[in-house]
Image (cartoon, coloured by chain):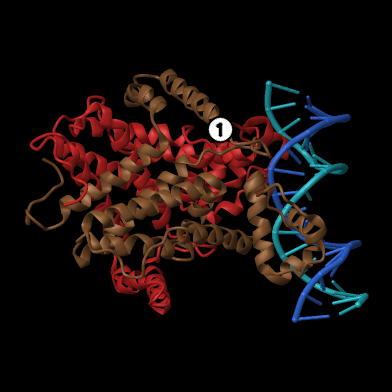
Chain colours: A red, B brown, C cyan, D blue
DNA sequence: ACCTGAACACCGTTCAAGT
DNA sequence: ACCTGAACACCGTTCAAGT
C-alpha cells in the first residue's frame, strides 16, 4: 500500500484538508513524529506552504487531525451494533476487543502513542478521550456497574489502555523505512538487552526490578496487555454489588 | 521559592550539569514544554550555547534529566523503608501513597505528563519505568500476588497511574506566570465547559458520553484517581488464589 | 477562493577561537 | 578542561502577489 506513490496522478489533483491529513499520516507512518514538517507535506503534495495553511490552520491542528483520523479508523473497524449486547460476558469481550483495536492501532502507527498522551495532556476532554470513552463506556454499563460508578470504571479502563499502549508501542526509530515486517527477532533482541540492563542495576536500589528482569524478557506484550484488562475487569466485577454487597474488596 | 532569582550570585558560579538541569526544571515549571530552549537556558545561566552542550549532549537528554530529577524527588519524598511492610492492607496503602506522590508531582509540573509518555514511548524500559516499577512492585509482592503474576499486576498499576496522571494534569497554559494558586474556580469553570461540550455532542453518536456528562462535571480528579487504583487493587485481590482458587473472575 | 513561494523569526547544534 | 558566541541548516508561519 505504501509502495504506490503515483506522483503523476497526485500532482494536479485538487488540494483538500483530507488529502493533507492523509499525507500527514503517511509521513508519520513512514518516519515518525519528527518527519512531519510543513515542507515535507508541501513536497509530497507538490504545493506551497501557503496552500497547507489555507486548509489546516497550523501544525498542531494537523497532528490532531491525523490522530483523530487514525483513531476513528481503528474504532470503526469494529462493528459495534447500535443496540449493545446485554450479556455480561459479551460486554467484557467487547471491551477486550476495543482495547485490542487501540493496541493494534498504536503498534501500526507508533507515533499515536505520544500523540495520545499529548492530546490527553493538552486538551484532556478534547478529541481523543470522548471517542475512547464512548467505545468502552457503553459496555461498562452492560457489565452491571451501578450508575454512579460508570465514570470511575470507564476512566480506569481508558487510562490503563492509554498508558499501556504508550509503553508497548515499540518505536521503530528510522529503521522501518520501506523494509518489510521482520520485527520479531528485533523484538526479542530488544527485550534481551533491556532485561540484561535491569539485571545490571544495583540490587540494593532495585531489588524488585532485579527479581522480575527474567520475567520481563519472556513476557508477551499483547498477552500482558490483555492480562491488565482482565485485572481491571476482575476489579469491576468484585466491586459490583451483586452477590456480596457491603463487602470492601480493597485488601484481604 | 520561585521568587528568589538572585542573578548576582548566579552569574559567576561554576557551571555544572546539575545547575543546567535545575534551570531547565525552573523554565519548564514557569512556562511549559515550549519554554525550554537552549537560548532560554543560556540566558538564565548567563552563558553561551557551547557551554550547555559541553555538559549535556543535546536537548532530549536535558529533558530526560529534568524528568528524572523531578521523578526521583517525588518518589524520595516518601520514606519507603528498606524492609517493606508485610501486612496486606499496609501494602495497599503504600501503593496508594506512591500513586498519589506521582499524581501530585504531575500536578505541580504539568510538563511531566507529556514527558512521561514520551519517555515511555521512546525508551520504554529506560529511565522512568524502572523507578516507578520498583516503587510499586515491592508492595505488589507483599499483597500476596503469586510470583508469576508480579509483572502483570505491577505493570497494570503502573500503566494506569501513568495514563491517569497524564489526563488529570491540568495544563495551565501560559496563565501561571507568577500568579498565585487560585486554580480552583478555573478548574470548576473548565469542567463546566467540558461537560457542556459533552452534552452538546450528538446523542446518537455519543449516548454514553451524554449520560455521564453531568457526572464528569461533578467529579473530583484526585478522588477518581484513587478510585481507579482501588479498582485495580480489587482486581488483584480477586485474582489472587487465596480463598477461592480455580475460579475465573472475568465475568459473572 | 485558492494557491505560490520568498521572507521572517525562531530553533538545535556546531566549531574555531579564546581562557 | 571549560567556555564564548557567531554561523549553519532547519523549522513553523506569514503575506504580497498571482490565477
Choose top left, top right, bottom left or bottom right for residue B82: bottom left
| Residue A37, visible in the rendered structure | no
Identified at 17% across, 36% down, the residue is A240
Does A31 appear above or below B171? below
Locate residue A142, reporting x and y percent: 20, 31
Q: Nearer the viewer, residue B214 or B230?
A: B230
Identified at 53% across, 26% down, the residue is B185
Identified at 14% across, 34% down, the residue is A241
For disc 1, the chain is B
Identified at 23% across, 39% down, the residue is A94
Locate residue B115, reporting x and y percent: 53, 53
Q: Which residue is mark 1?
A: B183
Does B14 appear above or below B237? below
Secondary structure beneath dot 1 equals: helix
Neighbor class of circle 1 (other Cα within 10 Å; few <14, some 14-19, many 20+) is: few
Q: Nearer the viewer, residue A29 or D13?
A: D13
Amino acid at each position: 500500500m505504501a509502495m504506490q506513490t503515483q506522483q503523476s496522478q497526485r500532482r494536479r489533483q485538487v488540494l483538500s484538508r483530507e488529502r493533507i491529513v492523509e499525507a500527514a499520516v503517511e509521513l508519520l507512518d513512514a518516519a515518525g513524529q519528527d518527519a512531519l514538517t510543513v515542507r515535507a507535506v508541501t513536497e509530497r503534495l507538490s504545493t506551497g506552504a501557503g496552500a497547507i495553511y489555507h486548509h489546516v490552520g497550523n501544525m498542531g491542528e494537523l497532528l490532531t487531525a491525523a490522530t483523530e483520523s487514525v483513531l476513528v479508523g481503528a474504532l470503526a473497524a469494529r462493528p459495534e451494533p447500535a443496540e449493545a449486547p446485554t450479556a455480561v460476558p459479551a460486554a467484557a469481550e467487547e471491551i477486550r476487543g476495543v482495547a485490542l483495536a487501540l493496541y493494534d492501532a498504536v503498534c501500526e502507527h507508533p507515533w499515536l502513542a505520544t500523540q495520545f498522551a499529548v492530546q490527553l495532556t493538552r486538551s484532556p476532554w478534547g478529541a481523543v478521550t470522548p471517542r475512547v470513552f464512548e467505545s468502552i463506556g457503553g459496555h461498562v454499563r452492560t457489565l452491571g456497574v451501578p450508575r454512579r460508578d460508570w465514570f470511575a470504571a470507564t476512566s480506569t479502563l481508558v487510562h490503563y489502555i492509554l498508558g499501556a499502549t504508550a509503553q508497548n508501542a515499540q518505536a521503530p526509530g528510522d529503521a522501518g523505512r520501506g523494509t518489510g515486517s521482520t520485527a520479531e527477532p528485533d523484538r526479542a533482541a530488544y527485550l534481551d538487552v533491556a532485561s540484561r540492563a535491569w539485571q545490571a542495576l544495583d540490587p540494593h536500589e532495585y531489588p524488585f526490578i532485579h527479581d522480575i528482569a527474567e520475567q520481563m524478557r519472556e513476557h508477551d506484550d499483547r498477552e500482558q496487555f490483555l492480562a491488565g484488562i482482565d485485572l481491571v475487569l476482575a476489579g469491576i466485577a468484585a466491586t459490583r454489588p451483586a452477590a456480596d454487597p457491603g463487602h470492601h474488596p480493597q485488601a484481604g
